[in-house]
Image (cartoon, rainbow, N blue to C red):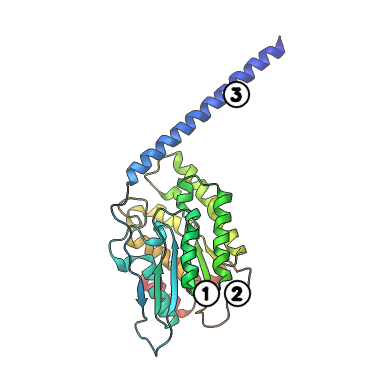
Amino acid sequence: MVGRRRLRAAAVALGAVGGGFSALCALLGEQGRRARLAIGVPEAPPLRADGVYSPADLRGIRPSLRFAVVGDSMAAGLGVDRADELPGVLMARGLAEESERPVRLTTYAISGSATRDLRAQVDRVLHDQPDVALVIVGANDVTTRVSIGVAVSMLGDEVLRMRLAGIGVVVGTCPDLGAIRPIAQPLRSVARSWSLRLAKEQRGAVERAGGIAVALGDLLSPEFLARPGELFSADRFHPNAAGYDAAAAVLLAPLCSAAGVWHGGPLPEWPRRSVLAEARRPTSRVVAWVNRRR
């Protein structure tokens, strides 16, 4: 008799857990739908401003440094109002000032891209053979629920392809989606946990492949959480000009290292040092550039 009662109690408990899990899934699905409606669909693709950017005081004629931007809508700069506010343009100008060379910017990033879409972009990069590439990707892997292991493996493969071709690579890892206000709780907490875990795994894969990883979530999330009205664009999902300015400030020094324009030593050998180690030795012009942008 006692055994039967225990079995019935266990069955009731399992049913309650199963029902609760189903309800949670339904709630998350509904919150995801509402977040997509709140964020909306971009009215136009990101602006483009590919071309050559030269230092203000160009001393002599030197070959252009070729700079590629790869990834998703954040890499492409969706959310700004003017072409000169694009993150690629901000960093091309910073690279030009630091290297004292013209910098040729080419944007391969496509809005809506997830990591699985990088292969086609990297194929074009390898054909054009830039000197350095910036990759920003990951947010769409979270929103489309791509397996973290799959996304990380694909990212490592693409970074390695570029590194084997002699291209310096900097990867801005997945941003903290917990800062996106249109995503309601508890979905926002789920998105935050997933995005931070993805970013951590991305960093390991990038460094194993010989690239430099920049933890955008760790470095930028406190500011975006504290000042969302100042750093997000009207859709409250993509950064605005000030938000991209903040991102450029933490990406410029690693890009200078990957591009080989440091004054005072060769690039580190594989495995790369972390971006925090690199950031401890910026040249005076990098510091000045970051301070001016702020």
Distance Cα–Cα, label 3 vs label 1: 55 Å
Neighbours of disc 1 within 10 Å: few (<14), some (14-19), many (20+): many
Q: Secondary structure at mark 2?
A: loop
Local secondary structure at mark 1: helix
Q: In the image, what residue occupies the spot 45% across and 70% down?
A: 252
Tell which circle, 1 or 2, labels the residue nearer the N-terminal end: 1
Neighbor class of circle 2 (other Cα within 10 Å; few <14, some 14-19, many 20+) is few
Q: Is residue 2 above or below residue 17?
A: above
Residue 163, given in percent of the width and then of the height, sits at: 56, 69
User: Who comes first in sequence, dot 2 or dot 3?
Assistant: 3
User: How many C-alpha atoms fall within 10 Å of the one at disc 3: few (<14), some, or many (≥20)?
Assistant: few
Residue 93 in picture, x, y percent from top left: 38, 75
Q: Can you give x and y, in whole percent of width and height, for residue 199 in the image?
A: 53, 55
Could you tell me how far apart the alpha carbons at marks 1 and 2 are, in whole angstroms?
Answer: 9 Å
Relative depth, front residue between 129 and 239: 129
| Circles 2, 3 touching at the beta carbon (< 8 Å) | no
Residue 27, compared with residue 155, is above or below; it is above
Q: Earlier in the sequence, mark 3 or mark 1?
A: 3
Q: Which residue type does callout 1 highlight?
A: Ser
Image disc number at residue 268: 2
Residue that carries the numbered disc 1 in the rendered image: 257
Disc number placed over residue 14 in the picture, else none: 3
Q: Pointer 3 and pointer 1: residues touching (CB < 8 Å)?
A: no
Q: Amino acid at mark 2?
A: Pro
Query: Which quadrant does the C terminus fall into?
Result: bottom left
138 lies left or right of 152: left
Cα gap from disc 2 to disc 3, whole angstroms: 55 Å
Q: Are marks 1 and 2 in contact (CB under 8 Å)?
A: yes
The relative height of residue 30 versus residue 138 in the rendered view (above or below) is above
Which of the two residues, 194 or 150, is positioned nearer the viewer here?
150
